[in-house]
Amino acid sequence: MTKILLDTHVHTISSGHAYSTILECIDQAFLKKLDLIAITDHGPLLSGSTKIHHFGNLKSLPRKIKRENKILEVLYGVEANIINYSADLDLPNGILDQLDIIIASLHHPCIRSKGDNTDLIISVLENKRVNILGHPNDLQYLFDIKKVVDKAKETDTIIEINNSTLKQSNLRFGARDILKEILLECKKKSCYVILSSDAHFALDIAELDLAIDLLKEIKFPDDLVLNTSTELFKNVLNLKK
Ligand SMILES: [Zn+2]
Ligand SMILES: [Zn+2]
């Protein structure tokens, strides 16, 4: 695979159960020679995470940081919780509209699975504000893969390949098998995907080995992987605006 230039899912101490500051994350992004990093702390409904006002003030942070000859672009957004079967998120639209990037994820205990979550996820993808469907390979929240990938393609929503969900502790739940099925469908339909670390500690930023191994295994086309071009990634983000 061509070089990984961006990591779009990173948590800081503001999430409550993550352990690095924004500056520590930025330091790591420079060390790993990334072009872009997205700070996406958990939405307010997840226990211990930060409050609405935190997200409302992200506009005060710098989007470009220069060190020596390298410029790092920093996006500030949220990993929002889907909170009900109307697919509402846990931040008001007025705040969401100020953010650079919005990942929408299903998290226990913010919402209970109904068994088949296809209609719910389709409503999430139809939300113009949602850029990325976070960790769709959670066996607690099953859905019809074909219908969801079709809708992601139709709505220009990016499917996330979350490296953290491929770590050993999750494999016994089948997280890799489900993700493989989703990716095969994305390959078939030419649907964009993004690899993310979901780092809760700065040293994990851009650590994507398990996700890359999976893509290699199924010969997933590089040109659908948005981590390889910041320009393409931003173009795809803008498609939904
Ligand atoms: Zn999550
Ligand atoms: Zn996360």
Image: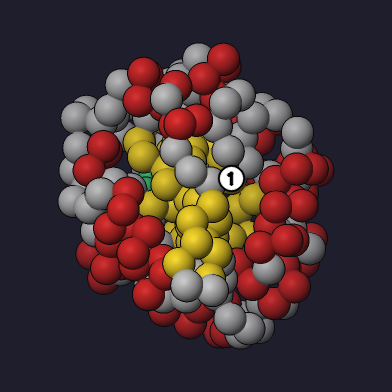
Q: In the rendered image, is residue 51 in sight?
A: yes
Q: Nearer the viewer, residue 122 or 194?
A: 194
Whether ligand 2 has any atom under 8 Å from the Cβ at mark 1 is answered as no
Residue occupying image coordinates x 25% and y 49%: 21
Residue occupying image coordinates x 42% and y 43%: 40
Crowding at dot 1, Cα within 10 Å, few <14 / some 14-19 / many 20+, comes out as many
106 left or right, relative to 15: right
Quarter of the rendering containing residue 143: top right
x and y, in percent, of residue 184 in the image: 66, 68
Quarter of the rendering containing residue 94: top right
Kind of element beneath mark 1 = strand
Q: Nearer the viewer, residue 187 or 128?
A: 128
Considering only vertical position in the picture, is 38 above or below 228? above
x and y, in percent, of residue 165 in the image: 36, 60
33 left or right, relative to 143: left
What residue does disc 1 label? 132
